[in-house]
Amino acid sequence: MTSADWPAPAKLNLFLHVLGRRADGYHELQTAYQLIDLADELTFGLREDGEVRRLEGPASVPAEMDLAVRAARQLQAAANSRRGVDILIRKRIPIQGGLGGGSSDAATTLVALNELWGVHLPVGQLAGIGRELGADVALFIHGHSAWGEGVGELLTTMELPPRHYAVVFPGIGVSTAEVFQASELTRNSPSLTIRGFLQAGGRNDCAPVTTGRYPEVARALDWLARRGDARLTGSGSCVFAGFAERTQAQAALSDLPGAWSGFVAKGLYRSPLQERLAAERARHGQG
């Protein structure tokens, strides 16, 4: 059986404060995750022989390193399942762009196969598996825009003002590990409340590191800042600016330099993955 059209949406970090370094080497963070309507699309071909294969996906990421493949194997192990899968990933989210594409692919794989394999692990256990793959995976399993704390996995559902975003990918990827290991990264931002963020906003503590080490990201941020309130998402490389109207976001991307790519995305409260899961359950009389 083949099950298609499972979306893996992207996210923006509307701010990102690094509060300190933990004993385990990870960092204490605060952020506001905004889901957007740009999404990868995954198809799952179910197998009965236990094999997990990626038949289509980004050429720059070896199949064995792909978070979707790793997620499927983690779920197999957690559920002691003998079922397998062929995974096809149609990438639309730029790789190493700070948009969470790999984490979202992993989350969609966990959510979809939990249903398609008939495993039915609770959401909390799925999120626990996801945390072993990356801090952002839990967000996409959670399925709503959210306030994030801890390493980004402690989530409080958050309904953000409706916005359209002009997003620019400057044609290069950024290593998240490099940025968070950088000696120049500040790690002492004060803790914010949700109300404080909504009233006064916040900054991205990774931005000085990323723009200092990746000049093309700095150029993209400067270019977009002349058209709106430009921010870096995650550790980069993508930059974005929010607008009340879609036409304003489209106008901000006019005359985009040829070496870069850009798109307009709508902010979402609920992930389209949740809608796809509901449709799958309705199809089998579980809705």
Image (cartoon, rainbow, N blue to C red):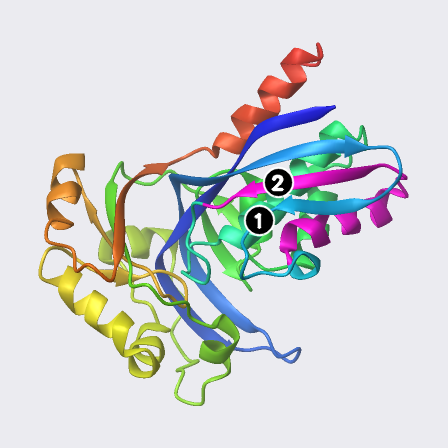
Which residue does the numbered mark 1 point to in the structure image? 57
> In this rendering, does residue 128 appear at all?
no
Q: Residue at x 90, y 43 (%)?
A: 80
Q: Residues within 10 Å of mark 2 (few under 14, many from 20)?
A: some
Q: Secondary structure at mark 2?
A: strand
How many numbered tags mark residues here?
2
Residue 88 numbered mark, or none: 2
Residue at image coords 66%, 77%: 24
Q: Position of residue 228 (x, y in %)?
A: 13, 55
From this view, report whether residue 159 is shown above or below residue 155.
above
Closer to us: 236 or 153: 236
- Of helix, strand and loop, which one carries label 1? loop
Specify whether residue 128 is painted magenta.
no
The residue carrying pointer 1 sits among few (fewer than 14), some (14 to 19) or many (20 or more) residues within 10 Å by Cα, namely: some
Please, which residue is most extreme toward the top here?
Answer: 285
**Magenta stretch in the rendered image:** 66-91
Q: Nearer the viewer, residue 180 or 81?
A: 81
Residue in view at x 46 percent, y 58 percent: 95
User: Disc 2 and disc 1: Cα gap in Å?
Assistant: 6 Å
Mark 1: amino acid: Gly
Give the x, y percent position of residue 195: 33, 51
**Are the two marked residues, 2 and 1, in contact with CB atoms closer than 8 angstroms?**
yes
Q: Quadrant of residue 214?
A: bottom left
Q: Position of residue 1 (x, y in %)?
A: 74, 23
Q: Amino acid at mark 2?
A: Leu
Left or right, 151 with respect to 183, comes to: right
Foreground residue among 136 and 82: 82
